[in-house]
Image (tube, rainbow, N blue to C red):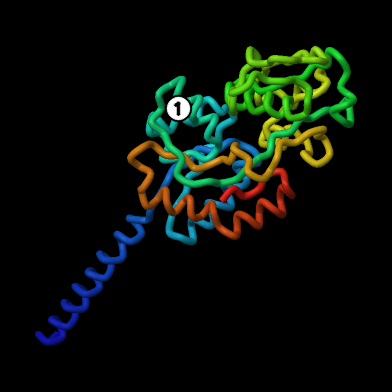
Amino acid sequence: MSVFTRRTLLAASIALGAALTTALPVAAQQKSIKVGVMSGAEEEVAQVVKKVAATKGLNVELVPFSDYALVNEALERKDLDANAFQHKPYLDAQIAARGYKIMPVGFTFVQPIGLYSKKVKAVAELKSGAKIGIPNDPSNGGRALNLLAAQGLIKLKDGKGLSPSLLDIAENPKNIQISELDAAQLPRALPDLDAAVINTDHALNGGLDIRKDTIAVEKREGNPYANFVAARKGDENRPEIKTFVEAYQSPEVAKFLDERFKGAIIPAW
C-alpha cells in the first residue's frame, strides 16, 4: 500500500471519527423533563402534549398521580421538573400550609366544576335537608361552596373570595347537609348523596358526563380556576419547561380538548 493511500485512509478514518464524535452528543444531549400529572383525563391530555413536545426536541416523562396532595410535594423534593394539575387557589393554599417554593409558568386548561346528581334533574328539586358532598381540600371546597352560593342554596359571608369554608356560611335556608369528602371519592359517594360538587377530572374518571349528569356548572368565561404548568422558583426560565408550556399551548392540544371532551375541559391560554 502506498504512503498516499495510507494517508488517504488515515484522513478518512479521522474524518469519520470526527463526524461520529460530533453526532453522538446530539443524541446524548436530547432535552428531557419529568412532569407530574393526575391520572385519567388529564394524563390523556398530557400524552398529546408529550407528542407535540417530541417534535420540538423535548422528551417528556409523565408521572401520573391519583392524589392531589402528593404532586407538589414531589416537585418540591425535585422528583419532578414540573407538574400540570392545579389552579392558583389550590397552589396558594398549598404554599400557605407547606411553604412550597413553586410558581405558575403557563396556563393549560379550565375544568369547570359541576354539581352532579343522580336523584334530581334541577337545583330547585333539592329538598330541605338535602345531602351534598364537596371536596375536603380548602381550595376546591371553597370553589364548591361558591358554586352552591351562586345557585342560591347557601349565602356566604362577605369578603371571603375564592376560599370560603363551612364556617363562612351565613345563611342556609334549605338546611342543606354539606359533607366534606376526599375529592377522588365523590363520584363513588354520589349514589348515597342528593348531589355532589365534583372536580371534572374525577367526574370523568368516575364515568360522569358534565353535559348530562350536572344540575349546575360554574361559569366558563373568566373562570379564576384555570390550571397551569408549575415549576420550582428559579426554574421558570429553563428552556425545557418553556418548551413544555409551548407544547401544551398548541393547536394540536386545543383540537384534542375540543374533540375528546366537548366542553368539559377547555383551553385556558
- Which residue is drawn at the image coordinates 68% and 23% (left, top)? 145
Furthest residue in direction left, as rendered: 3
Residue nearer the viewer, 53 or 144: 144
Position of residue 146 in the picture relative to residue 212 (left or right): left
Splitting the image into 4 quarters, where does residue 131 fall?
Answer: top right
Splitting the image into 4 quarters, where does residue 169 fall?
Answer: top right
- Which residue is drawn at the image coordinates 62% and 50% (left, top)? 267
Q: Is residue 237 above or below residue 204?
A: below
Crowdedness near tag 1: few (<14), some (14–19) or many (≥20) residues, C-alpha within 10 Å? some
Q: Is residue 57 above or below residue 233?
A: below
Position of residue 136 in the picture relative to residue 115 (left or right): left
Q: Secondary structure at mark 1?
A: helix
Q: In which quadrant is the N terminus drawn?
A: bottom left
- Which residue is drawn at the image coordinates 82% and 33% (left, top)? 215
- Which residue is drawn at the image coordinates 86% and 14% (left, top)? 128
Q: Position of residue 14 (x, y in %)?
A: 19, 73
Residue nearer the viewer, 124 or 99: 124
The type of residue carrying mark 1 is Glu
Q: Position of residue 113 (x, y in %)?
A: 69, 34
Residue nearer the viewer, 224 or 249: 224
Q: Position of residue 193 (x, y in %)?
A: 81, 19
Q: So how many labels did they put on this image?
A: 1
Residue at numbered disc 1: 73
Q: Position of residue 98 (x, y in %)?
A: 43, 21
